[in-house]
Amino acid sequence: MEILIPGSLVPTSVAPDLALELKRHCPYLLELLERRPAQVLSLAPERTGCTPREALLLRRLGYPDAMPSNDSSETSQESSHGPNLGAGLAPLAAGIQVGNEPVWVAQLCSITIGREGARMLAPHSLNIAPHEADALFEAASSLWAGSEISALSLTANLWRIWPGNATQALSMSPEAVAQMSLSDWWPQDPSFKAWRRLLNEIQMLWHTHPVNALRAERGLPPINSLWLYGGAHGWRPNPAPSPVQTINLLADACLEGDWAQWIAQLPAVSSELELTLKQHSTKTSEQPIIALTGQRHAVRLNPFIPRWWQFLLPQRKQNWTDWWNLQN
């Protein structure tokens, strides 16, 4: 079993101060940090094409290009040739398990323009209703008539896309790009010209669509674009992955840089972690792995299994602040 705590690793600029707050308000996690050996995984989205949380998901499900289980620093996906690691999320989301055809999907999203350029809102914050997605798909469906591009609606926020003769582009998952500047990740290859033209037409059509007018009345962000990602072939997930339980109290605060809220959630994280571990111990003596993730790294706190002579000595505490202040 693995216990996942997204948003528990913070940027270098605030790490020293938040380490002090973690010591004060999250005693149960602090105890694990001091007792367990840490395995640091460098998972920069610009290299992997996904968030560290998504990279761990791909590994747990057995994605062939995911980093090996004994990797302590880098992913196995270093090459700029061919799909990156995050491209495997597209066939997973589309449920495509076989075939040699690259799988592309597009997620409905909301893009804002500010002083720092174009940014995407976190996809999970949009609350897209099925009837809204259906209306937007129907409105756009006439635009690709006669085009080399075709699309199929899969869920309320996801379409499968056949981009025609488009060639490989580096994939970036919507969750990852929500933390970055969009301008660096639009498909720029000339073969994606038809997709870019179609996307511009969709954006203009949706700008005045009644769905977005009603969303504005309810104080919701507009659904004004699509984010294309993928390029990997179908693959078959592990049918019996190791179970994972997620403590998701810190993720939104970390993404938004709301450190007051992050600190406020620490006592609840400590309590939920303690309860989860106690419930797990009643079922098995095996200690679960604790996985911490941030924007560019993951850390796995592996079970500490002492040798016989270590029972005779006071347990030595791990100097966890050495890796806590991870460089961005």
Image (tube, rainbow, N blue to C red):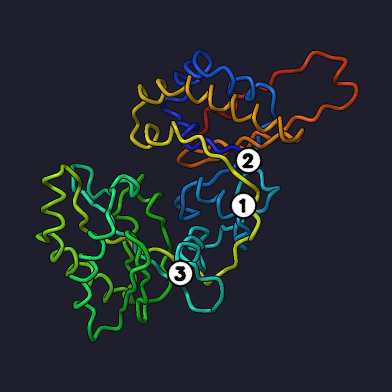
Q: Secondary structure at mark 3?
A: strand
Q: Of 113 and 138, which appears nearest the observer?
A: 138
Could you say which quadrant of the image residue 311 lies in? top right
Q: Which residue is mark 3?
A: 231
- The residue that label 1 is drawn on is 60
Residue 275 against residue 81 in the figure, above or below: above
Labels 3 and 2 touching (C-beta < 8 A): no
Q: Amino acid at mark 3?
A: Gly
Q: What residue do we see at 24% from left, 60% from top?
A: 131
Label 1 residue SS: helix
Q: Earlier in the sequence, mark 3 or mark 2?
A: 2
* Mark 1 vs 2: CB contact within 8 A: yes
Label 1 to label 2: alpha-carbon separation: 10 Å
Q: Position of residue 218 (x, y in %)?
A: 15, 44
**Measured from the top left, where is residue 135 in percent x and y?**
20, 65
Give me the C-alpha separation between circle 3 and circle 2.
29 Å
Question: SS for tag 2?
Answer: strand
- Please state which of residues 50 and 211 is positioned toward the viewer in this rendering: 211
* Amino acid type, label 1: Arg
Task: Give the mark, 3 or 1, whose residue is nearer the N terminus.
Answer: 1
* Residue found at x 53% / y 39%: 246
**In this rendering, position of residue 22 left or right of residue 188:** right
Location of mark 2 (residue) = 2
Could you give the CA–CA distance between mark 3 and mark 1, rounded to whole angstroms?
20 Å
Q: Amino acid at mark 2?
A: Glu
